[in-house]
């Protein structure tokens, strides 16, 4: 009779590892279901742990867990716009949009609930987290445009375009993720150039940027 295979040694997770495991389980659920539809029991089941253990790490319950998961997702989303300063500036924007749309695709219902504010767990803290992502995205884009001390018109144009990207993402999800992501990316890039051109008719700094981007292509 052959000896049985050895049983793998059990390793207790560290506090940080367990917390990350619970956040990963929560993010996976929030990615495909609105936050209102996710319970702590769901998170516990997805992580393969007991409900009391979830409370041990997140004594504030679902609200604390949601905010922590949202912060984790926000950190990931901010990194979408962290593009190396190499190559034409508009090409960099296109690569950042590729990562952004991949994030939207993977987080689906959770992304919709986040931006539409349709969750009972929305608070001033969660709103602040979302606003922080918008500010970080604007800062990254302005940095890549390589404009020294961007003025009011240019800053407002970039921020308005970011809100249009959010709206387009929500519509894209509503339309069954059509058109294809690559087509949506190109469309958003074209819109960015278009709004810059419009702003350039009123603002010399933006006009100079539009000319520089044309030479950069």
Image (cartoon, rainbow, N blue to C red):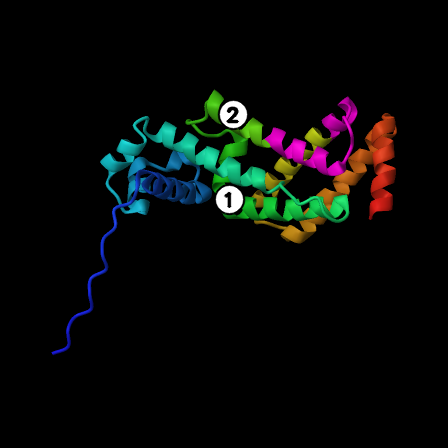
116 magenta-colored: no
> Quarter of the image holding residue 100?
top right
Q: What is the secondary structure assignment of the residue under circle 2?
A: helix
Nearer to me, 165 or 176: 165
Residue 59 on image: x %, y %: 29, 28
Q: What is the secondary structure assignment of the residue under circle 1?
A: helix
In this picture, residue 60 sits left or right of residue 201: left
Residue drawn at 88 percent across, 39 percent down: 211
Residue at far bottom of view: 1
Mark carried by residue 127: 2
Mark carried by residue 88: none
Nearer to me, 182 or 136: 136
Give the residue at mark 1: 108
Within 10 Å of disc 1 (Cα), the crowding (few <14, some 14-19, many 20+) is: many
Q: What stretch is highlighted in magenta?
A: 134-157
Residue at far left of view: 1
Residue drawn at 11 percent across, 78 percent down: 1
> Quarter of the image holding residue 35?
top left
């Amino acid at each position: 009779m052959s000896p049985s295979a050895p049983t793998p040694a059990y390793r207790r997770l560290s506090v940080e590892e367990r917390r990350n495991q619970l956040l990963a389980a929560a993010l996976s659920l929030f990615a495909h279901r609105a936050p209102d539809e996710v319970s702590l029991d769901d998170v516990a089941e997805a992580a393969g742990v007991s409900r009391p253990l979830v409370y041990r790490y997140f004594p504030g319950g679902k609200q604390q867990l949601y905010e922590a998961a949202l912060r984790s997702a926000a950190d990931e989303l901010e990194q979408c716009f962290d593009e190396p300063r190499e190559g034409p500036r508009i090409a960099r924007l296109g690569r950042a949009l590729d990562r952004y749309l991949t994030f939207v695709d993977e987080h689906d219902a959770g992304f919709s609930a986040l931006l539409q504010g349709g969750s009972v767990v929305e608070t001033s803290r969660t709103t602040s987290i979302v606003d922080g992502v918008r500010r970080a995205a604007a800062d990254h884009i302005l940095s890549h445009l390589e404009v020294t001390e961007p003025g009011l018109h240019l800053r407002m144009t970039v921020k308005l375009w970011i809100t249009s990207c959010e709206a387009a993402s929500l519509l894209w999800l509503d339309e069954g993720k059509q058109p294809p992501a690559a087509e949506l990316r190109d469309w958003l890039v074209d819109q960015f150039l278009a709004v810059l051109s419009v702003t350039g008719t009123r603002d010399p700094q933006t006009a100079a940027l539009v000319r520089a981007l044309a030479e950069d292509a």
